[in-house]
Image: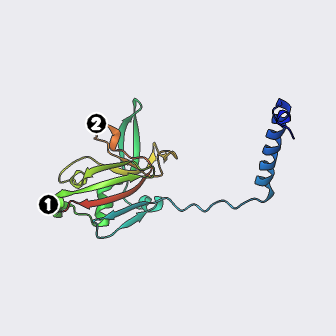
């Protein structure tokens, strides 16, 4: 076949149709099973006594809290579990134990896309702060949108929502070394 024959519009169109039909036949020849998707989880670890791996079902069984934030010019309600409750269950320092060296602890929150933020551990303790930060799994009574969840960290008293993390995947308690 010469180069001139390949460069005609009719030949180019025929190649596109041929490639598309071959690809289509290959896709439909033998259906492949759907990939197994592991249940989404939030991992809680680091300087805790009881590391956790929390699913949506786990969060649903914990005490629930609703917070309201301003979003896109309107008020939006998020529902989930207080981060203080999750940290308590994981055995992070809190209450009377949050003093001395423990006050130099922080929480590194990470999203599936690599976004990361830091909070001082005392920001979640009601003895120090009244910002009800939650791990949300619902927005306006419905499951979070795919691009938001299934877990989202919501800090309602932050003036900017930059520390609110969509697609939350990991919470790590870190104690600053001496």
Q: Residue at x 41, y 38 (%)?
A: 76
Residue 57, position as x, y percentages in the image? 47, 61
Task: Examine the rendered structure and indicate whether residue 116 appears above or below residue 105.
Answer: above
The quadrant of the image that shows the C terminus is bottom left
Q: Secondary structure at mark 2?
A: loop
Residue density around tag 2, few if under 14, some if 14–19, many if 20 or more, within 10 Å: few
Residue 151, position as x, y percentages in the image? 44, 52
- Marks counted in the figure total 2
Q: Residue at x 87, y 41 (%)?
A: 1
Residue annotated with mark 2 = 159
Nearer-N-terminus badge (1/2): 1
Residue annotated with mark 1 = 99
Q: Residue at x 48, y 52 (%)?
A: 150
As drawn, the label of residue 170 is none
Q: Residue extending furthest left? A: 100
Residue 66, position as x, y percentages in the image? 37, 47
> 130 or 91, which lies in front?
91
> 167 or 78, which lies in front?
167
* Quarter of image, res 169: bottom left
In the image, taking residue 12 as reference, residue 174 lies left or right, namely left
Task: Examine the rendered structure and indicate whether residue 86 appears above or below residue 162.
Answer: below
> 128 or 34, which lies in front?
34
Asked if marks 1 and 2 touch (Cβ < 8 Å), the reply is: no
């Amino acid at each position: 076949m010469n180069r001139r024959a390949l460069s005609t519009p009719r030949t180019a169109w025929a190649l596109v149709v041929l490639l598309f039909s071959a690809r289509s036949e290959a896709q439909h020849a033998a259906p492949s099973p759907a990939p197994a998707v592991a249940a989404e989880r939030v991992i809680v670890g680091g300087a805790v006594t009881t590391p956790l791996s929390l699913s949506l079902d786990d969060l649903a069984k914990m005490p629930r809290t609703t917070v309201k934030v301003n979003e896109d010019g309107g008020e939006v309600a998020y529902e989930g579990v207080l981060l203080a409750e999750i940290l308590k269950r994981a055995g992070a320092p809190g209450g009377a134990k949050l003093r001395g060296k423990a006050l130099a602890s922080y929480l590194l929150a990470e999203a599936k896309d690599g976004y990361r933020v830091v909070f001082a551990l005392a920001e979640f303790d009601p003895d120090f702060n009244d910002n009800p930060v939650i791990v949300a799994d619902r927005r306006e009574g419905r499951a979070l949108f795919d691009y938001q969840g299934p877990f989202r960290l919501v800090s309602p008293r932050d003036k900017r929502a930059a520390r609110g993390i969509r697609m939350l995947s990991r919470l790590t308690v870190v104690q600053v070394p001496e």
